[in-house]
Structure formats: structure tokens, C-alpha cells
Image: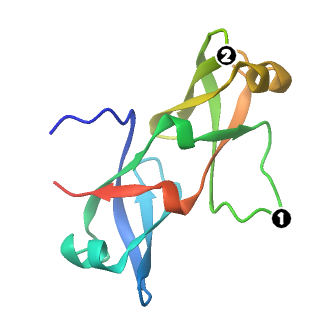
Amino acid sequence: MSLSIRNQLPGTVTAVTPGEAMATVRVRLAGGQDLTAAITRDAAEDLSLTAGSAVRALVKSTEVSLATARVQGLSIRNQLPGTVTALTPGDAMASVRIAVEGAELTAAITREAADDLGLAVGVPVVALVKSTEVSLGTA
């Protein structure tokens, strides 16, 4: 199956915490970073997710926010440090490619935000992704 989701990060499940309706799934990405996904409990069961399961974390580029440093006091669980490798500014939106340890992400942000953050190739950033915006797939 081909998907339009640009951000597809391979990893391994390290923990599954089921709740009544939702489950949180901790994933160790290939580069060693930890990522949290909040998915339905039914989905976790349908995918047979357990520690050691190989997964692919999927995140739409429009769900990746950027900061110029780690952010404290924030409910967003996933903060992946990286470096801007490409910036394609448009009239309204900008596409930003970020190299994170062992992977690459794309963020679609407003042109104004890219300008305000001073984004350019080589600038260090932190990619922010809410756990509810991370989908998981298995092979």
C-alpha cells in the first residue's frame, strides 16, 4: 500500500499501556528516540502490539510543529531534535525537511511561522508531534 503520508518512521514497540478506550504505545525509533502514539485500544489489539513489535509511525506533515529549542511545560509528548535540511517557502505555506537521528521528517507550516523562526538550512529545530497525531502500522 502506498500512502500520501510523508513521515513514516520505522521503530520497535517498547511498551503498550491499555486504557478503557485508548492505549498509549511507546516506540523506539531507529535513531534511538522515543515516540508516543495514542491510538484506540481496539487498534492496538487488532495490530497485536506488544513489546518488540516492529511498527512504522505515521505522521502527516501538517501535524508536525517546529520550535527552535525544547519546550518545557507542554503536554506534547514527542519532541524530536533535528536540523533543517531543506526549506521550500510558498506564498502561504512552507515545507520544511528536518533530519532527526536516523530519520527525516517533513513539516508543513505557515510561511510566516518559518520567517518568524528564522528557518534556513542548517538551523537546529525541535519537531513537536502530539501523541494523538501518530498512527501506527505493521508489516
Q: What amino acid is labelled 2 in the image? A: Ala
Q: Position of residue 108 (x, y in %)?
A: 57, 29
Q: Position of residue 94 (x, y in %)?
A: 62, 19
Extreme residue toward the bottom, this view:
20
**Residue under the image location 41 percent in, 84 percent down:** 21
Nearest the eye: 28 or 68: 68
Locate residue 129, reporting x and y percent: 59, 51
- Mark 2, Cα crowd under 10 Å, few <14 / some 14-19 / many 20+, is few
Q: Quadrant of residue 74?
A: bottom right
Q: Looking at the picture, tell me which residue is in the foreground, 77 or 109.
A: 109
Quadrant of the frame with the C terminus: bottom left
Q: Are the residues flagged by discs 1 and 2 in contact, CB closer than 8 Å?
A: no
Q: Residue at x 67, y 16 (%)?
A: 92
Q: Is residue 55 left or right of residue 81?
A: left
Q: Residues within 10 Å of mark 1 (few under 14, many from 20)?
A: few
Q: CA distance from mark 1 to mark 2?
A: 30 Å
Q: Nearer the viewer, mark 1 or mark 2?
A: 2
Determine whether 54 is above or below 121 in the image: below
Residue behind mark 2: 92
Amino acid carrying mark 1 in the image = Gly
Q: Is residue 83 left or right of residue 1?
A: right
The mark that comes first in sequence, 1 or 2, is 1
Q: Secondary structure at mark 1?
A: loop
Residue linked to disc 1? 73
